[in-house]
Amino acid sequence: MKTRFEKWYENYDFPGDAKTLFEESVLCYKISAYRASFIMSYLGIQTVLRERLLNSHNKPNNIPQNMWEKKLEELKDDNAWDNTVG
């Protein structure tokens, strides 16, 4: 039987990494590893946000252009990303 969370994430076309993290989250949840499930779903959401920011064509109005470009460069750097999110 599918959880509500499974039904939710299957309705969206998330990037491969995020989908994998969500699938891991569900597996952990089903074996009662709730903390691991929470962490995997958290990382999945963070991955979705990262991808959306990197693929965004519009800069927020309240952020200077140079600061926006710097943040995008930081998002592209996997090491910086791991240190920030992890």
Image: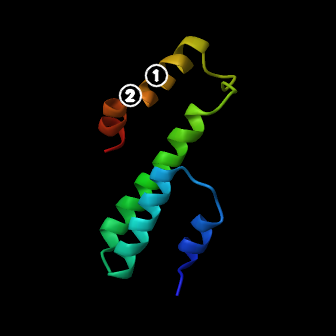
Image point (31%, 32%), residue name: 79
Q: Are marks 2 and 1 in contact (CB under 8 Å)?
A: yes
Up-down: is 7 above or below 1?
above
- The quarter of the picture where residue 25 lies is bottom left
Mark 1 surroundings within 10 Å by alpha-carbon count, few (fewer than 14), some (14 through 19), many (20 or more): few
Pick the front one: 34 or 3: 3
In the figure, 11 relative to 60: above or below? below
Instruction: Please identify the residue farthest to the top as the structure is shown.
Output: 66
> What is the crowding at mark 2: few (fewer than 14 residues within 10 Å), some, or many (at least 20)?
few
Q: Amino acid at mark 1?
A: Glu
Q: Position of residue 36 (x, y in %)?
A: 31, 66
Q: Which residue is mark 1?
A: 73
SS label for mark 1? helix
Where is 81 relative to 63, above or below? Answer: below
- Residue 49: x, y in percent? 54, 44
Disc 2: which residue: 77
The residue at 54%/49% (across/down) is 15
Q: Secondary structure at mark 2?
A: loop
The part of the image, by quadrant, that contains residue 37 is bottom left
Please report the residue visible at 30 percent of the width from the left and 75 percent of the height from the top: 33
Q: Residue furthest front?
A: 16
